[in-house]
């Protein structure tokens, strides 16, 4: 079976938002190998997608947040180098007051990313941000904008 025909790998993505409706900001990070992105990872067998979003956010940013709001899914088509297409479950979290403007976090959880330093910062949630993100994340940022 060609990888594109495998069932999609389930992923959970955490979009942390802050600010008033007229000036929303999105928490993004610079991955040292692949550029700007959002916290996300594979949903483990038997794990609820919302629980996976909470866990991935903690592993990749150090933040412990709860009560995510589901904002839909995004189907990532198969591409060379991946074992299957992916189905991303998107969740929005409201940032608590008092988070820093930027911070570094040593990633945990994924063997491929453990020990990498992710540099977090806030970015204005605008159509321009969707264009500025690495192409893989552009459609997801557009979906967050529309939510």
Image: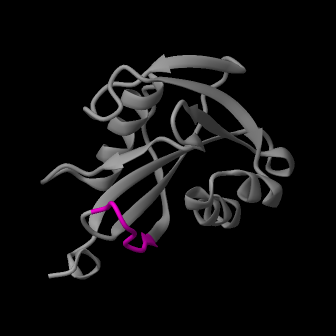
- Compare residues 33 and 84 and report the one nearer the observer: 33
Q: Which residues are magenta?
A: 75-82
Task: Please state if 140 lies on the left or on the right of 25 as rendered.
Answer: left
Residue 12 position (above or below residue 100): below
Coordinates of residue 88 in the picture (x, y in percent):
40, 62
Identity of the residue drawn at 75% across and 52% down: 132
Residue 128 on image: x %, y %: 82, 56
In terms of image quadrants, where is residue 20? top right
Residue drawn at x 27%, y 30% is 109
Residue 54, given in percent of the width and then of the height, sits at 37, 39
Q: Residue at x 75, y 59 (%)?
A: 131
Residue 144: x %, y % from top left:
63, 59
Q: Residue furthest front?
A: 80
Q: Residue 23, located in which quarter of the rendered image?
A: top right
Membership of 42 in magenta stretch: no
Q: Which one is in front, 121 or 20?
A: 121
Task: Report the quarter where the N terminus lies.
Answer: bottom left
Q: Main secondary structure of the magenta part?
A: loop
* Furthest-right residue in this view: 22
Q: Which image quarter holds the C terminus?
A: bottom right
Please indicate, yes or no, whether residue 107 appears anywhere in the rendered image. Answer: yes
């Amino acid at each position: 079976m060609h990888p594109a025909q495998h069932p999609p790998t389930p992923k959970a993505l955490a979009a942390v938002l802050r600010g008033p409706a007229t000036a929303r900001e999105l928490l993004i990070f610079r991955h040292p190998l692949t550029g700007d992105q959002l916290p996300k990872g594979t949903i483990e067998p038997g794990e609820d997608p919302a629980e996976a979003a909470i866990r991935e956010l903690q592993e990749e940013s150090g933040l412990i947040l709860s009560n995510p709001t589901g904002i839909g899914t995004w189907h990532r088509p198969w591409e060379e180098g991946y074992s299957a297409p992916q189905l991303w479950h998107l969740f929005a979290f409201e940032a608590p007051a008092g988070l820093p403007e930027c911070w570094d976090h040593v990633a945990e959880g994924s063997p491929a990313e453990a020990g990498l330093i992710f540099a977090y910062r806030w970015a204005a949630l605008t159509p321009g941000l969707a264009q500025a993100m690495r192409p893989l994340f552009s459609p997801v940022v557009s979906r967050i904008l529309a939510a």
